[in-house]
Amino acid sequence: MSDERRRELGQFLRDRRGNLVRAELGLPPIGRSRTQGLRREEVASFAAVSVTWYTWLEQGREINASRQVLEAIARVLQLTGAENSYLLALGGYAPVPLAEVAPIEQAPAHVQRLLDSLDFPAFAVAPDWGIAGWNRAYAGLYSRIAAVGPADRNLLWLIFTDPHLRDMLPDWEETSRHFVAEFRAEAGARLGSAAHTALISRLAGASPEFAQLWADRGVERFSSRQRVFLHPEAGRLVYEQHRLVPSDAPELHLVMYAPVPGA
């Protein structure tokens, strides 16, 4: 496990431990506070591990945690499914070793043909959220996509740095929060890699809003949801966002905006 992943694992545990409400767990308050989270000693006791070992885990020391122990800690901290998966990925138990996937700048030809066959906006996203392919309908929705250079053709980068795209999103604050939390949920195995570190550093330097959301450590799984765009020519457009993973190109995610009937 890299030093960065160990540090992130420790900070993530500290944040989630501090967010718990003692009264909801049937525990007495600490001093005058009624909302303060669990103590380290309490987490260690409930998870059946030693206080010293758990303290070292939060401190990011070079120790190994089994999957069973991490899952026990996740239960104590009442992590969501997405947060549990993120914790396991930080601990080296990611279901797919995405850290070893080479950068993808262009979708395979058969994936591009699939995108082109759709008459509604769709695009392909690489593990680093680089946009590796799109169809004509997506170019109609976001007209600048073809003009953006490969280094900037990243979904997170565009959301946080392109004022034109920001103006198209009436719910930009909510959408950007979802995106950062979903990206973090998928990025656990890549923490510490040079490419991931460079991307986060570049985004944080360019956008204080991204830096704050990243520091908040929100974690969410992708969920289909309604997306609204204010197109400069077509006006208000409403879609339902879905994501599919090609079985023969699992490193890519195809994001599709299906029109909502009657919207």
Image (cartoon, rainbow, N blue to C red):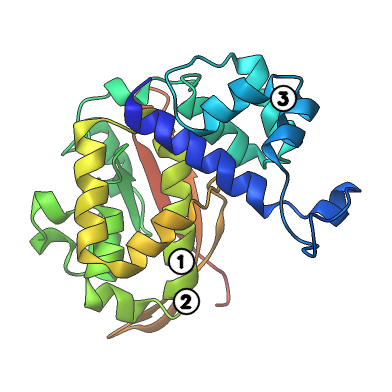
Between the residue at mark 2 and the residue at mark 3, the CA separation in whole angstroms equals 37 Å
- Structural crowding at the residue carrying mark 1, measured as other residues with C-alpha within 10 Å and reported as few (<14), some (14–19) or many (≥20): some
What residue sits right under mark 3 in the picture? 72
Question: Who's the residue at 69% across and 19% down the image?
Answer: 50
In this figure, which residue is indicated by the disc labeled 1? 175
Q: Nearer the viewer, mark 1 or mark 3?
A: 3
Is 93 on the left or on the right of 99, as rendered? right
* Residue in view at x 42 percent, y 29 percent: 6
What's the residue type where badge 1 is placed? Thr
Q: Earlier in the sequence, mark 2 or mark 3?
A: 3
Three-letter amino acid code at the position of disc 3: Ala
Under circle 3, the secondary element is helix
- In the image, 107 versus 67, the foreground residue is 67
Q: CA distance from mark 1 to mark 3?
A: 32 Å
Mark 1, secondary structure of its residue: helix
Q: Is residue 23 left or right of residue 70?
A: right
Q: Nearer the viewer, residue 45 or 186?
A: 45
Q: Which mark is residue 171?
A: 2
Q: Are marks 2 and 1 in contact (CB under 8 Å)?
A: yes
- In this view of the protein, which residue sits in the foreground, 139 or 161? 161
Residue type for callout 2: Asp
The answer, for residue 228, to whether it is visible in the render is: no
Instruction: Identify whether 244 is placed above or below 101.
Output: below
